[in-house]
Amino acid sequence: MNGPDTYVFCDGQLLVRAGTLEPATAAEAVPAGSTARQVLDSFTVRPQGFGAMAVSGSPGEAPAGCEWIRLRTLIAAESPCSADASRALGLLNWRESHRFCGVCGHPLGEHPVEMARMCAHCGHVDYPGISPAVIVRVEKEGRILLARHVERIPDFYSCLAGYVEAGESAEEGVRREIHEEAGIEVRDIRYAGSQYWPYPSQLMLAFTAKWASGELRLQAEELVDAQWFDPTHLPAVPPPGSVAHRLIHEWN
């Protein structure tokens, strides 16, 4: 399947043709003469050349012959469009939160060449930012540590994760996050892989680690529950396509 000319989003959900994972077109999202939805943002993604569009309204209602889906569905299906769609959504999120110059406060406009925004008043150029985050498979005596998080899908158990803070390496972020959230120390930290995650714009850095010392002591504002699970008897975990799923099932 070739990618579309434009990826259309509403409240973070992607418009696809009903019953498929084929992204719909801008013309299908906002038919000529229609006033049901307004275009909130529309631009060309460089250097790839496809478009990204955000429209108003609710994803609960879709144009005829179409439906709105969460981008996770496209990623889980390993669609060839998932990388471009993720880039489109990440850039839409960035533009929504970077409408004004952080130096002088004037509105930002389009950079004439680069995938960036530029201030016509002071000349400041703002580039899309990515927030690095670590996600870790911790092992102890053949079992892996999985937790239910307060602010994520409540029925899923997943690996511990958190943002890398200023002044620390990714490995230092692993040690700090695991200690803060679960109260334990880890060793033998090994990089496993990465995945871009446009919620809103994260680069997930996956690691494996071994338990070193301590008993589980949960950070209540972050975790509802955490347990050591036998890899052959797992609870509900994130679906295929996510870096968490690969950490749990593939990256040992």
Image (spheres, helix red, strand yellow):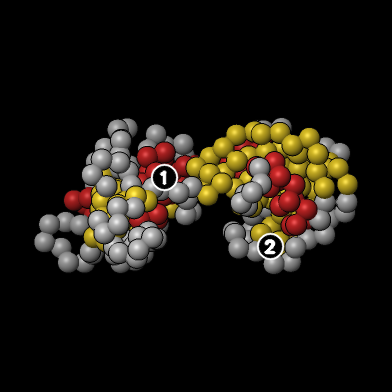
Dividing the picture into quadrants, the one containing residue 1 is top left
Which labelled disc corresponds to residue 86?
Answer: 1
Dividing the picture into quadrants, the one containing residue 239 is top right
What type is the residue that disc 2 sits on?
Glu
Tell me the quarter of the image containing the C terminus: top right
What type is the residue that disc 1 sits on?
Ser
Pointer 1 or 2: first along the chain: 1
Of residue 49 and residue 123, the one placed in the foreground of this image is 123
Residue at image coords 30%, 57%: 122
How many numbered circles are shown?
Answer: 2
Looking at the rendered structure, the secondary structure element under dot 1 is helix
Residue at image coords 39%, 44%: 87
Mark 1–mark 2 CB contact (< 8 Å): no
Residue at image coords 22%, 64%: 38
Looking at the rendered structure, the secondary structure element under dot 2 is loop
| Residue at image mark 2 | 222
Of residue 55 and residue 20, the one placed in the foreground of this image is 55
Q: Which residue lies most toward the front here? A: 122
Mark 2, Cα crowd under 10 Å, few <14 / some 14-19 / many 20+, is: some
Residue at image coords 26%, 51%: 110
